[in-house]
Image: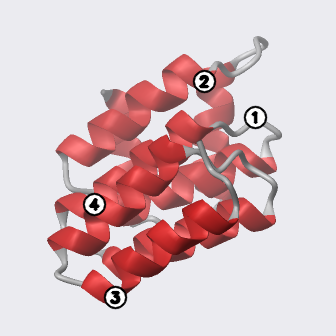
Amino acid sequence: QNVCRDVKALGAKDGSDALERIVRRRMGDTIFESRYAMHLLQQLGQAHEWKSSLAVLQCLQRLSLEMNAYLVSASISICSTLSEWKQAVHTLREMADRRVEQNTIVYNAAVSTCAKGEQWLQALQLFREMADNRVE
């Protein structure tokens, strides 16, 4: 929880060296585990800190943590909490550019966010992409 508080205090500055120091401090000499990252993202989600969660996701990528659908989905779901559908779609696109697995978990989170924001055409477009990309 202290790490979550520290991350929130930074104001979600993208590329923040301070954010990276916080995450590195938590890592210590061990490999940063996806399980801990998920826990941190869940805490940020409960605090409605979608900007901080996305900053953490970017930080984890810089630190070479293997990104997976669950981490990306968690960040997109946080966007859903506040109907930040544009950011959810942007995150989906960004993760695809970085070759992170795009599966039904990730797409479902993005479609749900679009639906919550009443962005029906965007949601339908994502469904079409799923079919075109043979997402399972």
**Which label number is shown at residue 121?**
3
Is residue 124 visible to the viewer in this orientation of the structure?
A: yes
Q: Is residue 79 above or below residue 87?
A: above
How far separated are the C-alphas under marks 4 and 2? 23 Å
Q: Amino acid at mark 1?
A: Leu
Q: Is residue 62 left or right of residue 24?
A: right
Between circles 2 and 3, the one closer to the viewer is: 3
How packed mark 3 is, by other alpha carbons closer than 10 Å (few <14, some 14-19, many 20 or more), is few
Q: Secondary structure at mark 4?
A: helix
Between circles 4 and 3, the one closer to the viewer is: 3
Mark 2 and mark 3 residues within 8 Å of each other at the beta carbon? no
How far separated are the C-alphas under marks 2 and 3? 33 Å
How far separated are the C-alphas under marks 2 and 1? 8 Å
Q: Amino acid at mark 3?
A: Leu
Give the residue furthest to the top.
30
Image quadrant holding the C terminus, namely top right
Q: Secondary structure at mark 2?
A: helix
Q: Amino acid at mark 4?
A: Ser
Residue highlighted by disc 1: 65
How far separated are the C-alphas under marks 4 and 1? 26 Å
Going from N to C along the chain, the mark reached first, 2 or 1, is 2
Between circles 3 and 1, the one closer to the viewer is: 3
Q: Amino acid at mark 2?
A: Ser
Q: Is residue 108 above or below residue 84?
A: above
* Residue at image location 67% in from the left, 54% down from the top: 134
Residue highlighted by disc 2: 34
* Residue at image location 32% in from the left, 35% down from the top: 42
**Which label number is shown at residue 112?**
4
Q: Quadrant of residue 90?
A: bottom right
Q: Quadrant of residue 23?
A: top right
Residue 34 point in image, percent of width and height: 60, 24
Image quadrant holding the N terminus, namely top left
